[in-house]
Image (tube, grey):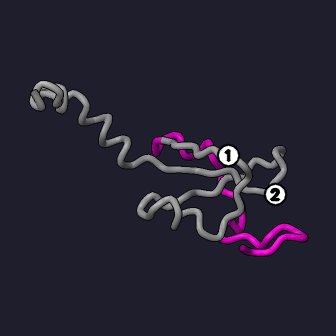
Amino acid sequence: MFRDKCLSAVSRHALRHVMDEVTHARVFLEKVGVPASTRERWVELDTAHTLMAALAGKWLLEFPTLHVALPEEALLFPLAQHALPEAPPAGNVWI
């Protein structure tokens, strides 16, 4: 029964190029506090770490959207300058 639900060797071989692309995918998050008119407003997340570790030191708006891009699409997400950990917005403190 389990064998019927697994992909056949032919199917796995056909999907191999897709899986190779996915393993090289890059993940971007829109930086908080950067005007939408600014082109360089993206922060790249480190996919080698957990999501919690990758988001450490970053401010998130409610329901952030992660953008997953293939290597050739990464140029569509120009990185924000000083994209490392941000200072808290005025009136807020780290919790």
If the image is split into quadrants, where does the C terminus sit?
bottom right
Q: Tell me the magenta residue range.
A: 70-95
Q: Is residue 34 magenta?
A: no
Compared with residue 82, is residue 4 higher up or lower down, i.e. above or below?
above
Q: Position of residue 32 (x, y in %)?
A: 76, 56
Residue 35: tell me if it is visible.
yes
| Residue located at (54% from left, 46% from top) | 74
Front label number (2 vs 1): 1
On the image, the x and y values in percent for residue 33 come to 81, 57
Q: Is residue 84 above or below residue 38?
A: below
Image quadrant containing the N terminus: top left
Q: Earlier in the sequence, mark 2 or mark 1?
A: 2
Q: Position of residue 12 (x, y in %)?
A: 18, 32
Q: Which residue is mark 1?
A: 63
According to the picture, the residue beneath numbered tag 2 turns out to be: 33
Q: To which quarter of the image does residue 18 belong?
A: top left
Dot 2 crowding, Cα within 10 Å, few <14, some 14–19, many 20+: few
Rendered residue at 58%/50% (across/down) = 28
Residue 14 image point, x, y percent: 21, 27
Q: Is residue 86 magenta?
A: yes
